[in-house]
Image (cartoon, rainbow, N blue to C red):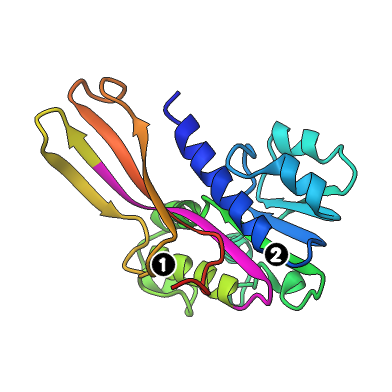
Amino acid sequence: MAYAADEEDSIQVGRQAIERLGSRRKVLVLGSGLLRDVPLRLMRDRFEQVMLLDAVHLLPARIAARHRGVTIVVGDLTGMADVMAGAPGPRRDPLARWRDDPDLDLVISANVLSQLAMAPAAWLERRPGREEDLPPDLPPDLPARIVGWHLDDLRALRCQVCLLTDVSYSERRRDGTEGADIDLMHGHDLSRPRARWDWEVATWGEVARDVAHVHRVHAWPNWGKET
């Protein structure tokens, strides 16, 4: 299975983050998704409270929430949901309620950063092209700004942050050449990762006979504090 190695590498980084902690009271997972790239059982065993935050909670998260100490939280990590719904005013801080929580020991941004700009970008494409129809404080390069917002949100936390994200996408061909090479971080430099690996999202023949789609993943058990 093409995804299994990436998921196991991600889980190992999450385990390293947990082992670094002096106390283990609360852990918050951002972008919990299918929960296949975070060490869920270890978090349940080690933490008093496990919080799973996502815009939509799939079945694995709902099942996990049946366990004592595990809760699900519905939240939009872009902070753009109200703006996209037509509300006036600036972006909301999606992590405001946890910003100064003294019991929050770990936040895991779980392979969600590169995906955050997708819905806002699609929303922009559906809107009329007239400049006056857009919110006045909307930045000109919205995808890049959304990546930057999430990084700023993580930096502002008092606790340890474990960051997992794919940073680039490329096409690899059987003849050894490479096609498209896309920066999923939109120009943001995340510093040297503690771990990195290639995630083969589509193997030969899945999309095209002679082309494989590969994402480069970077990971930090203690992002912002590692050299």
Q: Is residue 163 magenta?
A: yes
Indicate which disc, 1 or 2, sits on the residue closer to the N terminus: 2
Relative to 139, say whether 52 is above or below. above
Q: Amino acid at mark 1?
A: Leu
Residue designated by label 2: 21
Relative to 131, say whether 167 is above or below. above
Range shown magenta:
156-170
The single residue placed furthest to the right in the displayed view is 68
Query: How many marks can you see?
Result: 2
- The answer to whether residue 159 is left or right of residue 122 is right
Residue 103 placement (x, y as % from top left): 82, 70
Residue under the image location 45 percent in, 52 percent down: 118
Residue 76 visible, this orientation: no
Of the pair 117 and 10, the residue shown nearer to us: 10
User: Crowdedness of circle 1 by 10 Å Cα count: few (<14), some, many (20+)?
Assistant: some
Of the pair 116 and 164, the residue shown nearer to us: 164
In which quadrant of the rendered image does the N terminus lie? top left
Indicate which disc residue 142 carries: 1
Residue 184 placement (x, y as % from top left): 35, 56
Q: Amino acid at mark 2?
A: Leu
Residue under the image location 62 percent in, 45 percent down: 38
Residue 19 placement (x, y as % from top left): 67, 57
Q: Secondary structure at mark 2?
A: loop
